[in-house]
Image (cartoon, coloured by chain):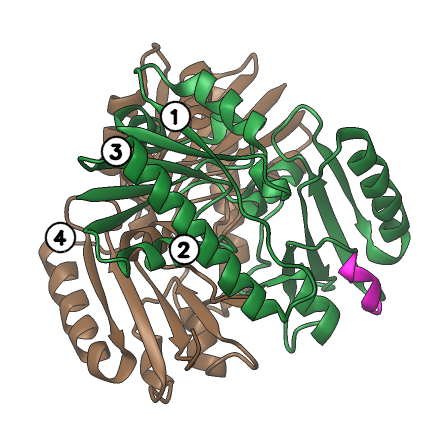
Chain colours: A brown, B green
Amino acid sequence: MITLHLIGIGTGNPDHLTRAAVRALNAADLILLPCKGPDKADLADLRRAILAEVITAPVPVAEFDMPRRAAGAEYRLAVDDWHEAIAKVWTDTIARHLPQGGDVALMVWGDPSLYDSSLRIAGRLGAGGGALSVKVLPGITSLQALTAAHAIPLNTLASPVTITTGRLLRAGGWPEGAVSVAVMLDAGMAYEVLDPCGLHIWWGAYLGLAQESLFQGPLAATAPHITAERARLRALHGWIMDIYLLRREMPDD
Amino acid sequence: MITLHLIGIGTGNPDHLTRAAVRALNAADLILLPCKGPDKADLADLRRAILAEVITAPVPVAEFDMPRRAAGAEYRLAVDDWHEAIAKVWTDTIARHLPQGGDVALMVWGDPSLYDSSLRIAGRLGAGGGALSVKVLPGITSLQALTAAHAIPLNTLASPVTITTGRLLRAGGWPEGAVSVAVMLDAGMAYEVLDPCGLHIWWGAYLGLAQESLFQGPLAATAPHITAERARLRALHGWIMDIYLLRREMPDD
């Protein structure tokens, strides 16, 4: 019997971990640690630094290579195949290190509920026939790290919030009826497709880390600075994780 | 000079606190603790229990009575007056306990960015002329506690999420183009205004606490059980904090 603990760890700062997350990591029989993958989400060094900071018990860590996502294929099919490949690597790694079963911990950037695949991948493990239960420990999302860094609310008073992706914003433009729009997973400045008139942007990268970078201002004036800075930082650090919030400026808020 | 630390504490379980939140509480010169208010958000006993669990330094705690919000008045005006009254109580309490300035900590349910007024109220303090800076420490929101308890993602694959309030859902119905809708601050079963066909609900109350209660299922079949259970639990415990996620069922997800 395996219990897989999907543990939200925030955006890279060990201080984002909750007391529950620290306890679950220390109580695990095995910690799975993805590495050598092509994706920015596989930042193994950052995960190792977090473990070095919070682990006080002798917990075995199993590193595994992340499969690559097929390029060019239709998006949903490519994701489907990729998730299947990751599920297989998880299954094999757990079977090798923990043949008798036990508690397995997987560190998830942000929170496992928000634009993360771990829950969907874990759903495939159960299908393999082995006894598996999944426990989720919430973590600080990049969205919360962003609003905290800027000291702003996510929503304006009595208004809704839309959370979306760069891909969706680029394809569909400003969401119908939206006031505040948080954009995640934007690899390519999707805000450029919007009419910037009346829009304000709050942007952040490497939130909570030493290299944290923040910009905010009217979208028209600020977007070029963000675009340039994002390219510069990505080249400088070799990776970037960023997020932004857009808001229609309201006269009374 | 005052630094006001708005510290997200999650939904009442001390294990929701982050390492940063625990450190900031212990490093504060004063902790402000609202009590005796009429609002469910003033659950002073729960706040005191969290402090008893995580505080290891001798930090003074100043309890203060929360002002009441005027009933009946136009919503925005009533909120405006109420925020002004709270800002005055904060200012007076800080001045009385910390005339030389220092670090003040305020524990905020969930995360200070999400449907919480602390940031707006803090904005009024600066207007008083005293030197004030605000720091925000993110916390686990009830939304994250809900999805963690049900072990579900907030978003379906490559889809947006709308976060809204019971008031807005009741007034406007299902948000245009939405797939997943998280409803906060619903004091009165706003889901009853929706055509339940094709909708699924995940509901939770007292998330992360011993009295946690969860329901999920097709909205049509599940709503009556939630409505009845919510009334029963509220009468039993004298208060309730709950939240739900609604999702259009998609054939391919």
Q: For marks 4 and 2, give the CA distance.
A: 38 Å
The mark closer to the camera, 4 or 2, is 2
Q: Which dot, 1 or 4, sits closer to the camera?
A: 1
Q: Are marks 3 and 4 in contact (CB under 8 Å)?
A: no
- Mark 1 and mark 2 in contact? Answer it, CB < 8 Å: no
Instruction: Give the CA separation, mark 1 to mark 2.
Output: 20 Å
Instruction: Say which residue label 2 marks.
Output: B121
Q: Determine which residue is flagged by label 1.
A: B61
Observer-side mark, 3 or 4, equals: 3
Residue A136 x, y percent position in the rendering: 55, 34
Asked which quadrant contains residue B184, the reply is bottom right
| Span colored in magenta | B189-195
Of circles 3 and 1, which is in front? 3
Residue B137, placed above or below residue A68: above
Total numbered badges shown on the rendered structure: 4
Chain of the residue that carries numbered disc 4 in the rendered image? A
* Mark 3–mark 4 distance (CA, rounded to whole Å): 43 Å
Helix, strand, or loop for circle 2? helix
Q: Does any portion of residue A166 appear in the rendered image? A: yes
Q: Secondary structure at mark 3?
A: loop
Lower sequence index among marks 3 and 1: 1
**Residue that badge 4 annotates:** A237
The relative height of residue A116 versus residue B172 in the rendered view (above or below) is above
**Residue B240 in magenta stretch:** no
Q: Are marks 3 and 4 on the same chain?
A: no
Q: Amino acid at mark 2?
A: Ile
Amino acid at the residue labelled 4: His
Location of residue A146 with respect to B197 vertically, above or below: above
